[in-house]
Image (spheres, helix red, strand yellow):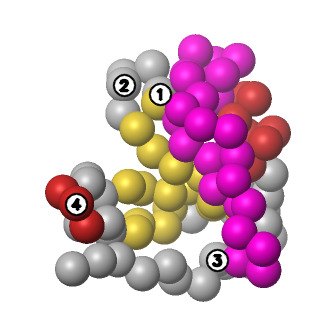
Amino acid sequence: MGGHMPNVPQGSGSSPIIMVVVTANNLPAVAYIHTNSVVAKLAEIEASGGKRLAEPMSISGMATFGYFQDSSESRMGLIGP
């Protein structure tokens, strides 16, 4: 089983949550939050007490991804252009 990558919404700057379920190798599901700048949002999260889990990764023609842990230790992802 696996998940799929839905089309990333383009819009007026709102940040909808996109759920991508990953079940391969017993990995947990990850909630991805859309943002217009993954790099800027990771910096904002770190300034607010969150922790960057990895450097942003870009997939040419698809999206940029970033992963973080918030102050309650929940792990989530960011996705953007």
Name the mark on residue 25. 4
Q: CA distance from mark 1 to mark 4?
A: 24 Å
Label located before the other in sequence (4 or 3)? 3
List the residue tagged with mark 2.
73
Kind of residue indicated by mark 2: Glu
Start-end of magenta stretch: 45-68
Tell me how far mark 2 sits from mark 4, CA to CA.
22 Å
Residue 26 seen: yes
Q: Are marks 1 and 3 in contact (CB under 8 Å)?
A: no
Pointer 1 with pointer 4, Cβ within 8 A: no
Q: For numbered disc 2, what is the local secondary structure?
A: loop
- Identify residue type, mark 4: Asn
**Residue type marked 1:** Asp
Image quarter hosting the C terminus: bottom right
Q: Residue drawn at (75%, 29%), measured in percent from left and top?
A: 43
Q: Which quadrant, please, contains the N terminus?
A: bottom left
Residue 28: horizontal and vertical position, in percent?
26, 53
Residue 15 visible in the displayed image? no
Find residue 70 and name its label.
1
Q: Disc 1 on helix, strand or loop?
A: loop
**Measured Cα–Cα span from mark 4 to mark 3:** 25 Å
Gap in Å between the C-alphas at discs 2 and 1?
Answer: 5 Å
Say which label, 1 or 4, has the lower sequence index.
Answer: 4
**Mark 2 Cα shell of 10 Å, populated few (<14), some (14-19), many (≥20):** few
Observer-nearest of 34 and 59 = 59
Q: Secondary structure at mark 4?
A: helix
| Labelled disc at residue 8 | 3
Q: Which mark is residue 41?
A: none
- Amino acid marked by disc 3: Val
Q: Main secondary structure of the magenta part?
A: strand
- In the depicted structure, whether residue 13 falls above or below residue 70: below
